[in-house]
Structures are given as structure tokens and as C-alpha cells.
Amino acid sequence: MLRKISLIALVLFATIAVAEKKSPYASPQMPAYRVESRGFNDGQRDIKRLCDSAGRELWKHFPDYKIEKMVIKRGRGGPITLYNRNSNGEIIIRLDTGNTLWCQYAYQFAHEFCHVLSGYDEDYKGNMWFEETLCETASLYAMRAMARSWKNDPPYKHWSNYRDALRSYSDKVIKSRTKVHEIYAKGLPAFYQTHKAALTKEPCDRSLNGAMSLVFLKLFEEDPESWGAVRWLNSTPSPKGETFEQYLTKWRNAAEKKHKPFIEKVAGLYGVTLPAGK
């Protein structure tokens, strides 16, 4: 009898292992990173599972892309990705959240991970607002995608119902971006020209780049593979005084051929016609 029970247990264990192995949650595997859970007031394993889920929604569109190792730490004063690596050569991502505020973890990590995917660098910041806009888009995109995928494939089975909270959180953020109505009324080129000086001075103005992110959210949800273009955003350093047109042209010229039409489409949304290039 004991032998029979043992055999049944082995069969069940094998079945569960196969199911976990085939789960799309585990694919693609995220690049190497670790979590220092001190200060978060929650376990390292849960935080990593949550960040894995948010990151994969973007990472799946970056095949064969190699990035440096990362470490997630508790921060204060807002989430941030540091330019300087630590003594282990790791990119430091600080998330300003804690406990089990999973929506905040997801939102913040997707934003910071997008900076890493874009090849962020410490150079001229005159066009940094555009990278910030894409990273704000990444947060909303990842959370809305997680809300869909968690219905059948959550990190843990008992997290499945939390998908409604993910969608509700992203909906509230979208609703808070009231300046998007100015884009509807005037168009994106006029919106940019009106706020160009403010964006250049403060690239992290969420009322401005948050409004523009809603335009890009639609683009990326219609064509998710276009996220792959982001890896060439900072392909070379930006010199002081670089114009937005020069910034976009550099991006277009560096990108793979399949992504060039998307980048030219982005330029067109701002009323910018890029010169003939590579």
C-alpha cells in the first residue's frame, strides 16, 4: 500500500513538474538579476517573481539581446536606475515601494527595466524626455499585459485574481494623465512644441511625458514587436545640443531594418521628417 501511494506521489510530482516546465510564465527566461530584499518587508522570491512577470512582457521582444547583470534594491525618494555600476559590475535598480504593493513593484520595475533595455547612458539630457515617455509606456504596457496573462498563467496560482488589481492600477494612471486631452485637441506636434522647453528642463515631468505615453501605448499594443527598436535608442552618446530630429535620426540609422519604419512613424507623429539614411 505504501509503495502504491509512493508511486502515485511520484506521478503527481512529475505531472506538476512538466506543467511548470511548459508554463509560458517561465519563458523567456529573464536576464540575470538578483533582489536584495532588505527594506522591502517582503520575501526575495515573491519580489523576483513579480518583477520577472513584468519584465518578461518587454523582454520577449528582445531576442538575443545581451545586457549586464542587475540588482534590485530598496530605494527612497523615487525609483531610479543608477548610471554607476556596483563593485560586482551590476546595474543598480532602486524601487521605492515595499510590503506587498505588487502594482507598485510592477509599475516601477517595468519603467526602470525599459531604461536598461534602451541602453541608457549619462550624456546630454535634452531629449531624455522621450526615453522617459517610452519608459512610462512600458509600465502601462507591462501591467495591462500582465492582467491578461495572469488569468491563465500567474506566477503563483493564488495570484490569479490579483490581475484585476493590475488592470485597475493602470486604468487609474491612464485616467490621471489629463494633459492627453491637449494632445487630442492640438495634435502631438503642437503639444511638443508648446512644452518643449519644460520637457528639456525636466524630462521626468509625468504630466507631460505621461500624457504622451498614452499615444505610444496604443502603438505598442497594436505592434508589440516594435519594443525591440528600443535597444538602439542610445546606440551612441548624445552630444550637447543634439536636436530631437538628430536624436531620432541616429536611432533610426542604428536600428535593424525591420524597426526603421516604426521609428519613422514615431518621427511622423511629432511632425518630424527624417533625412534619408542607412
Image (spheres, rainbow, N blue to C red):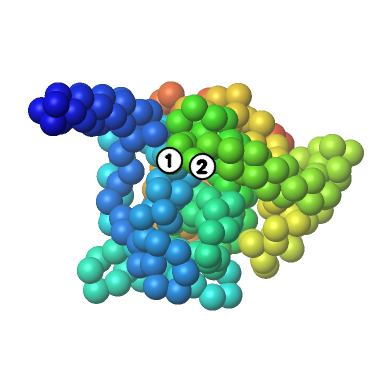
Q: Amino acid at mark 1?
A: Pro
Total residue callouts: 2
Closer mark to the observer between disc 1 and disc 2: 2
Q: Give the residue number, with chain letter if any, for mark 2.
A: 159
Given residues 117 and 239, the one toward you in this image is 117
Query: How far apart are the alpha carbons under marks 1 and 2?
Result: 7 Å
Identify the residue shown where x is 44% and y is 50%.
51
Q: Which residue is mark 1?
A: 155
Q: Local crowd at mark 2 within 10 Å, few (<14), some, or many (≥20)?
A: few
Between 243 and 202, which is closer to the camera in this rendering? 202
Camera-nearest residue between 122 and 49: 49
**Relative to 195, is 39 above or below?**
below
SS at circle 1:
loop
- Does 11 sit left or right of 258 as displayed? left
Q: Do the residues under discs 1 and 2 have CB atoms within 8 angstroms? A: yes
**Does 54 sit above or below residue 238?**
above
Report the quarter where the C terminus lies: top left
Indicate which disc residue 69 carries. none
Q: Nearer the viewer, residue 106 or 243?
A: 106
- Secondary structure found at label 2: helix
Q: Is residue 245 above or below residue 92?
A: above
User: Is residue 139 toward the left or the right of residue 206 in the image?
Assistant: left
> Residue lying farthest left?
3
